[in-house]
Image (cartoon, rainbow, N blue to C red):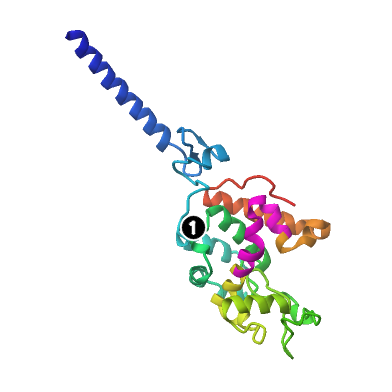
Amino acid sequence: MALTKISSVFLICLFGLYSQTAKSQFCGCSPILCCSQHGFCGTSDVYCGSGCRSGPCRTSRDPVDKIVTQKFFDGIINQARNGCAGKRFYTRESFLKAANATFDFTDTVTRLEIAAMFAHFTHETEHFCNIEEVNGTSRDYCDESNRQYPCARGKGYYGRGPIQLAWNFMYGACGVDLKLDLLGQPELVGSNSTVSFETGLWFWMNSVRPVLKEGFGATIRAINGVECSGGNSSAVSARTGYYRDYCRQLGVDPGADITC
C-alpha cells in the first residue's frame, strides 16, 4: 500500500512537470515565432503550417482590421513627402471599407498576403503619396482594338489608385465587377478613396492573389513583368525591401522566391 501511494505521488508530480513543460513549449515562443504542433518555436512551414498552435500561423485567419492597424497604416503614409495629395486621400478607413465590400477578401486574407499587398501599394504610390500616375496624362492607354471596352471620348485611362489601374480594358472589366461605370468615369478612381482601394483589391484578387503561393517574386511579375525582365532592378529591390519590412512588422516569415 505504501509503495502504491509513493508511486501515485510520483506519477502526479511527473504529470505536473510534463504539463508545465508542455505549457512552456506551447506558450513560450516569441510573438514573431510559430509554435508547431509538437511545441517547438520556428518560422518555416514545419512550425507555421499545418498543426501550428499559436503565433503567425499561415493557416490562421485574422480579421483584416486586426492586421491593418492604424499604426501599421500610419507607419507607411507618414513617410510620404509633405504636400502629397495622397496624404489627404488614402485612409485606413477607406481601405477597410473597400476590403469589406470586395469579394471574399476579408474571409481569406492572411498577414503574409497583407505584407505583400501593402509592399506593392507602397511602391506604386510612393507611400500613398500619389493618387495618379506621375505624368500619366501625357500617355496613351487606349487600346482601340478592344471592342468590348471601347475608350470614351476625352477620357484618360492612365494609372490611378494604389496599384495604378491602367488601360481602358482594365477600367472596363473592373467597373463591371464593381458595378461602376469606370469606363465612362475613370476619374472616380482618383476622386473617391474607397473606389480607389476597391480597384486595387479587384486587380489583386484577379491577377495577383492566384500567384501568391509561388512567392513574392511572382506577384512582382503579375504587377509589372518588365521589372522582372531587367527593366528596372531598383524597383524590384524596393518592392522586396518593403515586403521584408512588412513581414517583420506583421510577424510572418517572408518565405522563399522573394525576388523575380
User: Residue 259, relative to residue 105: is it above or below?
Assistant: above
Query: How many C-alpha atoms fall within 10 Å of the one at disc 1: few (<14), some, or many (≥20)?
Result: some
Q: Is residue 109 visible?
A: yes
Query: In the image, what residue occupies the spot 44% across and 43% down?
Result: 54
Q: Position of residue 246 (x, y in %)?
A: 58, 54
Closest to the observer, 102 or 131 = 102
Amino acid of disc 1: Ile
Q: Measured along the vertical axis of the image, is residue 79 above or below residue 252?
A: below
The answer to whether residue 63 is magenta is no
The image shows residue 223 at horizontal and vertical percentages of 71, 63
Residue at image coords 64%, 83%: 187
Circle 1 is placed at which residue position? 67
- Residue occupying the far left of the picture: 1
Image point 80% across, 82% down: which residue? 144
Q: Nearer the viewer, residue 134 or 21?
A: 21
Read off the magenta span: 202-221
Q: Nearer the viewer, residue 191 or 157?
A: 157
What predominant SS class does the magenta segment belong to? Answer: helix
Q: Quadrant of residue 170?
A: bottom right
Q: Is residue 154 left or right of residue 80?
A: right
Residue at the far bottom: name it. 153
Task: Give how far across and how far down residue 254 sits, in percent.
Answer: 61, 47
